[in-house]
Amino acid sequence: MDECNGVMVTKTQEPDVTPDAIRHRIRVLEDLRSYEDQPGVHTKRTCFACGAAQARGERCSACLSHELQHLRRKLARALVNKKVIYLAGPYRADTAWQVHQNIQRAERVAARMLTNGLVPLCPHKNTAYMDGVVSDDTIIDGCLALVTRCDALFLMEGWQESEGALKEKEHAEKHGLPVFQHAHEVDQWLHNGAAVAAA
Ligand SMILES: [Zn+2]
């Protein structure tokens, strides 16, 4: 398959966690937050996460709330039990014809992901032919927001030359998403449900 001509880019990924494990973590953080939220004089401890000098424990209430929000989204995903994979690759080109080719190429990859039991998030189809509706920067910011709602990211052929794909890859890695370049590694990840064996 021509989209699979490289190597897996990153080995880091969050371990698969069960809904029960996520629920347990939510309860722990809720307890910590209610401790932080108790009225009274806060100590001058510094929050590990944001540096605010207002925490009683290791993290301030705001940082705990932020992680709780993340965990609730994660729990919702775990309960649905479908993996969503973001398809990153070139969209923009010098001519409308080339843009069309890029969209069609992405569509073929999306179809293959669908037949493999994944839910592809294909930004090429989402904003196809909307060039000029908003600025390119706004489109890319929107794409990064979509990346963080996915379980993994797949790099399609030509990603190295795509400014958007490079940013999406960086964003995915920053948020601990597994990043793949080979279809067989995606299959392995999907069916094992665990980390792909490190090379
Ligand atoms: Zn904080």
Image: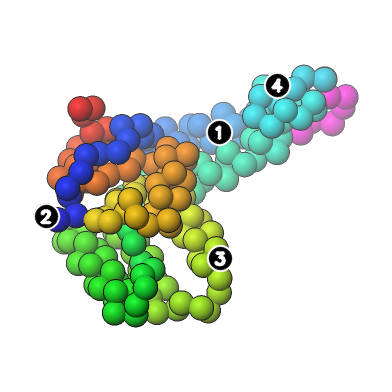
In percent of width and height, residue 65 lies at 64, 40
The residue drawn where x is 38% and y is 68% is 92
Per the rendered image, the range of residues in magenta is 37-42
Give 165 or 36, whichever is nearer the viewer.
165
In percent of width and height, residue 42 lies at 83, 24
In the image, farthest residue toward the front: 94
In percent of width and height, residue 161 lies at 34, 55
User: Which residue matches tag 3?
Assistant: 138
Amino acid beneath label 1: Arg
Quadrant into which the C terminus falls: top left
Q: Are marks 1 and 3 in contact (CB under 8 Å)?
A: no
Quadrant location of residue 118? bottom left
User: Which residue matches tag 2?
Assistant: 1
> Does residue 56 appear left or right of residue 17 in this picture?
right
Q: CA distance from mark 4 to mark 2?
A: 52 Å
Amino acid beneath label 2: Met
The mark nearer the N terminus, 1 or 3, is 1
Quadrant location of residue 48? top right
The mark nearer the N terminus, 4 or 1, is 1
The mark nearer the N terminus, 2 or 1, is 2
The mark nearer the N terminus, 2 or 3, is 2
Q: Is residue 82 visible?
A: no
> Does residue 85 appear left or right of residue 64 in this picture?
left
Work out whether 124 lies above or below 88: below
Dot in front, 3 or 4: 3
> Does residue 95 appear left or right of residue 116 in this picture?
right
User: Which residue matches tag 1?
Assistant: 27
In the image, farthest residue toward the left: 1
The mark nearer the N terminus, 4 or 2, is 2
Alpha-carbon neighbours of circle 4 within 10 Å: few (<14), some, or many (≥20)?
A: some
User: Which residue matches tag 4?
Assistant: 57
